[in-house]
Image: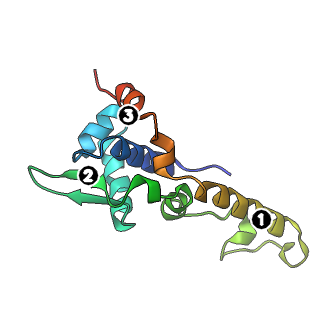
Amino acid sequence: MRLTYFSDYAFRVLIYLAVHPERRCTIQEISDAYGISKAHLMKVVNTLARAELVVAQRGPNGGLVLAKPAETIRLGDVVRRTEEDLGLVECFRAENTCRLTPNCGLAPALGRALAAFLAELDKQTIGDMVHGHEQSISRLLAVP
């Protein structure tokens, strides 16, 4: 199982916002902190806003904030909302043409593995990722 950069960046945005709950953060600020393309982060933020994980406000006093407490944002939910294709192998997909599908034991095994992976991520929240580390994370992400 490998997550895309899209999910990786989504986690980074959520962690950044969790470390700065007292204010609105800009996409430019987050882009600078991580050294990630602003254009790419805009796509990530749009997805997070549509998933109601962040609130984006435009204008001079605009910026981003978490839509709900970091302790309620489950990592598994973030993956489900940011990964376009969790089909680990062809037989998980609608366009499956594998001849082995009717008699293959691989799909059920991989299905259980994927379910276990997501279940483990569902045990953790964005809040868990930053709790007790807010100051050190903030220092690590400070733009010189």
Q: Which x, y percent locates residue 67?
A: 32, 60
Q: Which x, y percent locates residue 21?
A: 29, 46
User: Looking at numbered disc 1 in the image, what kind of residue is underneath it?
Assistant: Arg
Q: Where 75 sits versus 21, above or below?
A: below
Within-10-Å neighbours for mark 3: few <14, some 14–19, many 20+: some
Which type of secondary structure does the marked residue at label 2 adopt? strand
Is residue 29 found left or right of 111 in the rendered image?
left
Where residue 98 sits, quadrant-wise, is: bottom right
Of 20 and 27, nearer the camera is: 20
Q: Mark on residue 64?
A: 2
Within-10-Å neighbours for mark 2: few <14, some 14–19, many 20+: many
Q: Which x, y percent locates residue 53?
A: 38, 61
Which residue position holds label 3?
34
Q: Are marks 1 and 3 in contact (CB under 8 Å)?
A: no
Which type of secondary structure does the marked residue at label 1 adopt? helix
Q: Which x, y percent locates residue 66?
A: 33, 55
Where residue 121 sits, quadrant-wise, is: bottom right
Which comes before the other along the chain, label 1 or label 3?
3
Which comes before the other along the chain, label 3 or label 2?
3
> Marks 1 and 3, how far apart in space?
34 Å
Q: Are marks 1 and 2 in contact (CB under 8 Å)?
A: no
Of 63 and 95, nearer the camera is: 63
> Marks 1 and 2, how far apart in space?
36 Å
Looking at this rendering, what residue extends furthest in the top direction?
144
Is residue 107 found left or right of 115 in the rendered image?
right
Which type of secondary structure does the marked residue at label 3 adopt? helix
> Marks 3 and 2, how far apart in space?
16 Å
Which residue position holds label 1?
112
User: Looking at numbered disc 3 in the image, what kind of residue is underneath it?
Assistant: Tyr
| Image quarter of the C terminus | top left
